[in-house]
Each structure stands twice: as C-alpha cells, then as structure tokens.
Image (cartoon, rainbow, N blue to C red):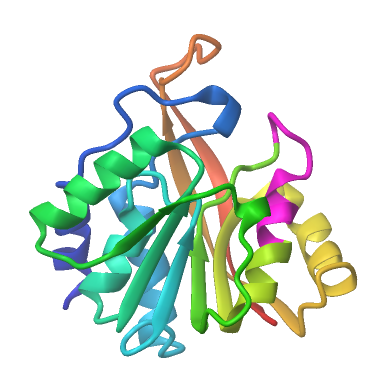
Amino acid sequence: MKLKQLEGLLGSLQQFSNPKVELEQYPTGPHIASRLLYMAENTFGGISGKVVADFGCGCGTLGIASALLGAEHVIGIDVDSQSLEIASKNAADLELDIDFIWCDIKNLGWRDQSVNTVVMNPPFGTRKKGSDMEFLSIALKVASGAVYSLHKTTTRDHIKRTALRDCSAKSAEVLCELRFDVPQLYKFHKKKEVDIAVDLWRFVP
C-alpha cells in the first residue's frame, strides 16, 4: 500500500466525539500516523506479519494503520471505553479484525502475550507528569522487537536519557521530527490549531 493511499484511509476515520483533557486525548492525524507506520514497515520491517500492540489506542488510528500494512494480529488498548467504541466502529468500517482491550496500561498483566512491535502516541505528560515515560517503560517490557512512539521534541534529551538508563532500552533513536497539529479541542486552547514539534522514536528493548 502506498503512503498516500494509507493516509487517505486514515483520514476517513471517526475521531473523539467528547475528548477528555485529563487523558490528553488528541487525535493522531492521518499525516503523522501514516508516516510513523510507513517508516516502521518500510525501513525496519516492523509491521507486516507481526503482532502489533497499539498502546493508548484512542480511536484506533495507529492500530488500524498497522492492520492495513499487513500486521498478522493487532491489539488496541485504552482506558477510555468511549474511544474504544469509536475504534471498533472504525475497524469494522474498514473490515479489519482488531482486538480492543479496555484496560489501564499500568494494569496490563501480560505474561505470555507475544508482541513483536508496540506503536503509540502516549500522553505527552503535560497533565500527569511522567505518564509518557510510564507508557514507554511498559511498552519496552512488552515488545520483543521495537517500540515506535511520538514524544515532544522539547523533551528529546530527557526521553533518551530515561529510556536508556531507567527503562533498559538497548537503543533509543529519533527517526524524524514531525509537526503534530493540535486542533482547538479544549477551553484553554486559544488558537484554532497549534503545531507542536514531535519526534518519532524507535526504541529497541
């Protein structure tokens, strides 16, 4: 599947109808999501034929992109049941078979679950300090191959240091810097849209 085709399909997905600020719910736009998955697959072979978990999957964008790129099995996990309803509908509309699990990432008691790749757009950690690294720490315990994740560019040094020192990552590499379009979703947003610079990371556990 070509990049533009993938981006077009992701652009048709329904997004949060009632986003929750405490969960830092922002839709992962089709431009950024398609590039994350396309790079994971075409540069590293991390998606096709693999078991992929989408942590904090929201409305399912990254998990759906993984399925469209030929993942053997996709599991989406989120703490918000309303988002999972939208994600299930999005997957059904595209006739994709994805397992969605209603669970807080912190309570994920996977022992024998074989996951090759974790993809995620975790909370940036602005509302709840450290939530971004909590996601990363658990992802590195679950993935046998690699973790692909988005983090604010301003936290680059902190992310690298923490991933290598505290989360036992073997490597932590920024693949590219992207513009994350944050729409005017919440009352404290003064502008219609804000661009945030984010890094696409690849971590090897």
Does residue 11 appear in this view? Answer: no
Relative to 54, residue 186 above or below: above
Whole-percent x and y of residue 60? Answer: 33, 52
- The magenta segment: 126-136
Q: Residue at x 49, y 9 (%)?
A: 187
**Along the horizontal axis of the image, is 124 left or right of 180?**
right
Please count the marks in the image.
Answer: 0
Relative to 100, residue 196 above or below: above
Give residue 126's quadrant in the image.
Answer: top right
The N terminus - image quarter: bottom left
The residue furthest right is 165
Q: Residue at x 55, y 33 (%)?
A: 24
Whole-percent x and y of residue 175? Answer: 56, 73
**Along the horizontal axis of the image, is 87 left or right of 199?**
left
The C terminus - image quarter: bottom right
> Along the line of sight, which residue is nearer the eye, 119 or 78?
78
Q: Residue at x 64, y 42 (%)?
A: 124
Relative to 181, residue 165 above or below: below
Whole-percent x and y of residue 134? Answer: 73, 54
Relative to 85, residue 92 above or below: below
> Along the line of sight, which residue is nearer the eye, 185 or 19?
19
